[in-house]
């Protein structure tokens, strides 16, 4: 088996259908399998997948396992040489899967790869290429200086090595996963792609940005305007920081932790302001 595609879905039936349609087209001529892990959706996602895509290996969870745990359930059953973690609110261009696989085959040190992500309005998503959020890079980003974090020096139309692969489209060499382990289930949602990317590079693998396209309808698979989102997102940032940089002195760690709490406070205040205004 060449490729195993894993899509974790929660209450996004219409986007999931568009995603699967694009995947089926892009998979033509590739020996592959597709998993959909449904995280206890309350919409018609399960019924839709069963009726429209009988070839999909549907895994129904009785609870919302979160992104990491749900992906790991499918990865453990995947037999592909490569494993693609794909968000349900994405659409894959027809040549993207073939192009990424050809590159990975030609670059045996490539442990993972991401692609050129377009927003719904056609603009390029800067998170297609990201740097590791070290204490210095994190501080710069928190202060609004994002060029280093988004690796803006890289050209958009050429392959380039990056530090962090987006979880929206994350192509992984199965042999690399066998070496470093699966997604860290401490992360419920967000941050697991940063952690996985870092573990790949620490083990000597390369992470790549490749100029093949997808559309990412960002935010459709998560609700970013509630307190739960803010809590989960910034908690993930703290988990990553404590896991990989907790050994550093207070002098280095305090500014980053303070910045995370500060930004979380601003986000919560903005949500409250909007709710009161409504």
Image: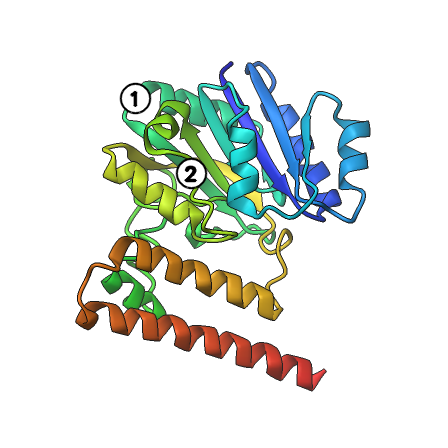
Q: Earlier in the sequence, mark 2 or mark 1?
A: 1
Residue 249, position as x, y percentages in the image: 17, 66
Residue 242, position as x, y percentages in the image: 32, 59
At numbered mark 2, what does the secondary structure look like: helix, strand or loop? strand
- Residue designated by label 2: 114
Q: Give me the residue at 25% from left, 68% from top.
A: 253
- Label 1: few (<14), some (14–19) or many (≥20) C-alpha neighbours in 10 Å: few
Residue 132 in the image: above or below residue 84: below
Asked if residue 164 lies left or right of residue 122, the reply is: left
Asked if residue 253 lies left or right of residue 56, the reply is: left
Q: Which mark is residue 95?
A: none
Please state which of residues 37 and 104 is positioned toward the viewer in this rendering.
37
At numbered mark 1, what does the secondary structure look like: helix, strand or loop? loop
Q: How many marks?
A: 2
Q: Give me the residue at 31% from left, 63% from top.
A: 138
Q: Is residue 243 visible?
A: yes
Residue 159, position as x, y percentages in the image: 33, 35
- Label 2: few (<14), some (14–19) or many (≥20) C-alpha neighbours in 10 Å: many
Asked if residue 235 lies left or right of residue 15, the reply is: left
Please state which of residues 231 and 269 is positioned toward the viewer in this rendering.
231
Task: Please say which color scheme the image uses.
Answer: rainbow
- Residue designated by label 1: 108
The answer to whether the residues at label 2 and label 1 have Cβ atoms under 8 Å apart is no
Image quarter for residue 275? bottom right
Q: Is residue 93 visible?
A: no
Residue 149, position as x, y percentages in the image: 32, 57
Q: CA distance from mark 2 to mark 1?
A: 16 Å
């Amino acid at each position: 088996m060449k490729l195993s595609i894993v899509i974790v879905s929660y209450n996004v039936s219409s986007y999931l259908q568009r995603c699967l349609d694009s995947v089926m087209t892009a998979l033509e001529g590739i020996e592959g399998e597709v998993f959909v892990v449904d995280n206890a959706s309350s919409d018609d996602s399960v019924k839709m997948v069963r009726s429209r895509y009988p070839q999909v290996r549907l895994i129904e969870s009785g609870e919302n396992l979160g992104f990491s745990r749900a992906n790991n359930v499918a990865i453990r059953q995947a037999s592909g040489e490569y494993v693609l973690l794909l968000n349900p609110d994405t659409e894959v261009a027809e040549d993207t899967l073939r192009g990424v696989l050809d590159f990975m085959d030609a670059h045996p040190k490539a442990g993972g790869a991401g692609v050129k992500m377009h927003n719904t309005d056609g603009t390029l998503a800067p998170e297609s290429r990201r740097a590791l959020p070290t204490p210095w890079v994190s501080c710069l980003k928190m202060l609004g200086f994002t060029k280093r974090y988004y690796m803006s020096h890289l050209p958009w139309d050429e392959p380039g090595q990056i530090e962090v692969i987006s979880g929206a489209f994350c192509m992984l060499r199965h042999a690399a996963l066998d070496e470093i382990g699966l997604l860290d289930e401490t992360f419920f949602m967000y941050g697991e792609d940063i952690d996985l990317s870092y573990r790949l590079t620490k083990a000597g693998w390369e992470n790549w940005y490749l100029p093949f396209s997808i559309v990412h309808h960002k935010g459709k698979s998560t609700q970013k305007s509630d307190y739960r989102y803010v809590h989960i997102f910034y908690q993930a940032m703290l988990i990553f920081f404590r896991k990989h940089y907790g050994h550093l002195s207070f002098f280095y760690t305090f500014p980053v932790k303070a910045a995370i709490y500060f930004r979380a406070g601003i986000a919560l205040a903005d949500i409250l302001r909007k709710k009161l205004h409504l």
